[in-house]
Amino acid sequence: MKSKIFLGMLLFVAVIAVAGIGYAEYGDIVLGKKLESMEKAGVKPVMFPHWFHRIRFKCKVCHEDIFVLQRGANDINMMAIMNGEFCGKCHNGNIAWEPLYCDRCHSWDGPVPPYTAAPAAK
C-alpha cells in the first residue's frame, strides 16, 4: 500500500516537473511566425499570455482595432511595437512597461507551431 502511494506521488511530481517545461495556459499564443529573424537576433520566440491580459481587459480593447482575429494575419515585429503598434499600443511606458527588456517577452522554450501562409482576405 505504501509503495503504491509513493509511486503515485512520484508520478505526480514527474508530471508537474514536465508540465513546467514549455508551459502555457489554454488560449495563450506562441508567436513564432518570424522565428528565423528571432534566431538571427538571438532571442527566443514569444508566448503571449492571452489569459493574463484577458482577466484585466475586455476583448474589445484589443480586437479588432489592434489585432485581427486570424492566425498569421498580424505582421507583429519589433519596429511596429516600438512605433506604438500592436503590443506597443499599451506597452509604451505609460499604460504598461516599455518593450526594452527582450527576455520579458522572448522567453518561450517550448514548441513553436508551424506557420502557413495566411488565408487571403475575402
Image (cartoon, grey):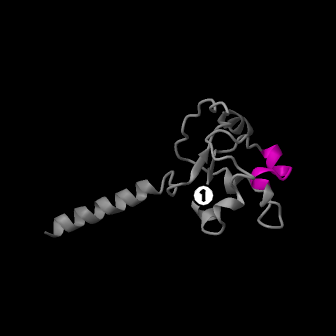
For residue 71, side relative to residue 79 (left or right): left
Q: Residue 57: x percent and y percent?
A: 66, 66
What percent of the width, then of the height, locates residue 52?
60, 64
Q: Identify the residue shown where x is 56% and y is 54%.
A: 28
Question: Residue 59 in the image: x percent, y percent?
Answer: 64, 60
Write down the region rendered in magenta: 78-88
Q: Residue at x 70, y 39 (%)?
A: 38
Residue 82 inside the magenta-drawn segment: yes
The residue wearing badge 1 is: 50
Q: Is residue 111 above or below residue 95?
A: above
Single out the residue that lies furthest toward the right: 83
Residue sitting at x 76%, y 56%: 101
Residue 82 location in percent, x, y? Answer: 84, 50
User: Which quarter of the rendering shows the C terminus?
Assistant: top right
Say whether residue 115 is visible: yes
Q: Main secondary structure of the magenta part?
A: helix
Q: Residue at x 86, y 50 (%)?
A: 83
Instruction: Name, please, the residue furthest toward the left.
Output: 1
Give the structural element (helix, strand or loop) at label 1. Answer: helix
Side of 41 relative to 30 (left or right): right
Magenta run includes residue 74? no
* Residue 100 shows in this picture: no
Q: Give the camera-side residue of 102 and 30.
A: 30
